[in-house]
Amino acid sequence: MNATRVLITGGAGFIGSNLATALGTDTDVIVIDDCYLGTPENLPSDVEFVEASVLEDDLPTDVDIVFHLAALSSYAMHESDPQEGARVNVEGFVNVVEQARRDGCETVVYASTSSIYGSRTEPSPEDAAVTANTGYEASKLARERYAEYFSNHYGLTTAGMRLFSVYQGYDGAEAHKGEYANVIAQFADDIANGRSPVLYGDGTQTRDFTHVDDVVRALVLAAEHELDGIYNVGTGTQHSFNRVVELLNEELETAVEPTYVENPVPESVYVHDTCADPSKFAAETGWEPHLSLREGIRRVCSPYQ
């Protein structure tokens, strides 16, 4: 990547720390994080860490590229405090991008979400209908609109990455997320330790599980190509929670049965199925996923073996 100085917000969290690690050897990387969902322990020593909120003034935005990954990133977080969710996800985004713009930065890559497509069993293209059924989804849609404003009004390139079910496992940077980690990480830790993983409903819900290594490559490519607009980042395939448990048992050589419970999330807002159509992003950057679900699960399970 040609940039010499990069800012990653939420950079001590799961995806952000993986990105910082990937960039750190060749680029001057600055990370800001308020340590709610991240920890500086996730970061290599050559990365500059600043403990700060995206809502603060005087952030270190004198950079070539901003990767804005900071967010309250779940339905539960937003329902417990909708105002705080909006402040962090929307106001925080505007605050960071505006400070960066004033400092001369012209390239922003930011995290949106696949949840706004709702439940779809067919691959979702970027022009599919989207909706805000939760505060989390509303905040990400608002982020996309503000990015459009910064692009149209100021000429910034703002690439919104609609990420599909990113995972890595507790041995990576997901451990700090605990109950907010991807279900693959949670199920793997349960099964490896002889606990029955808890599945909502009957376990037939599906996700387009995308390994964090593929997501990091996508973020870098979006910056290198100075993309502007909305892009899906997913594999284009979907797998059920039941299939994940099956693959984990195969890899760990266990036979732990899941426990099925009533879904605590209202059916009206629960996203039952997701699947990306990544063809637009692939056409513009050449990106394609390198890790199959089986290989990704092999990596998740290796620390337990």
Image (cartoon, helix red, strand yellow):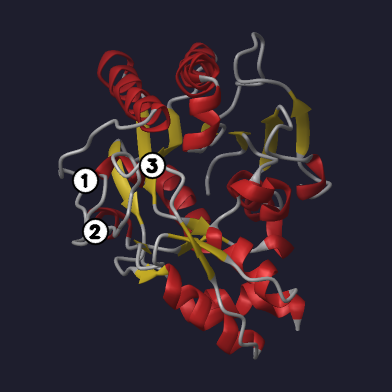
Q: Nearer the viewer, residue 117 or 16?
A: 117
> Which kind of residue does numbered mark 3 sit on?
Thr
Is residue 62 positioned above or below 102 on the image?
A: below
Quick check: can you spot residue 291?
no
Q: Residue at x 46, y 45 (%)?
A: 264
| Residue 296, quarter of the rendered image | bottom right
Mark 1 or mark 2, which has the lower sequence index? 1
Q: Secondary structure at mark 2?
A: loop
Above-or-below relation of 41 to 287? above
Residue 170: percent from left, percent from top: 70, 61
| Place of residue 45 in the rendered image (x, y in percent of width and height, measured from the top left) | 84, 47
Q: Which residue is mark 3?
A: 113
What residue did someone put label 1 on? 126
Circles 1, 2 touching at the beta carbon (< 8 Å): yes
As drawn, 122 above or below 134: below
What residue did someone put label 2 on? 277
Q: Badge 2, how many Cα within 10 Å: few under 14, some, many 20+?
A: some
Cα separation, mark 1 vs mark 2, equals 8 Å
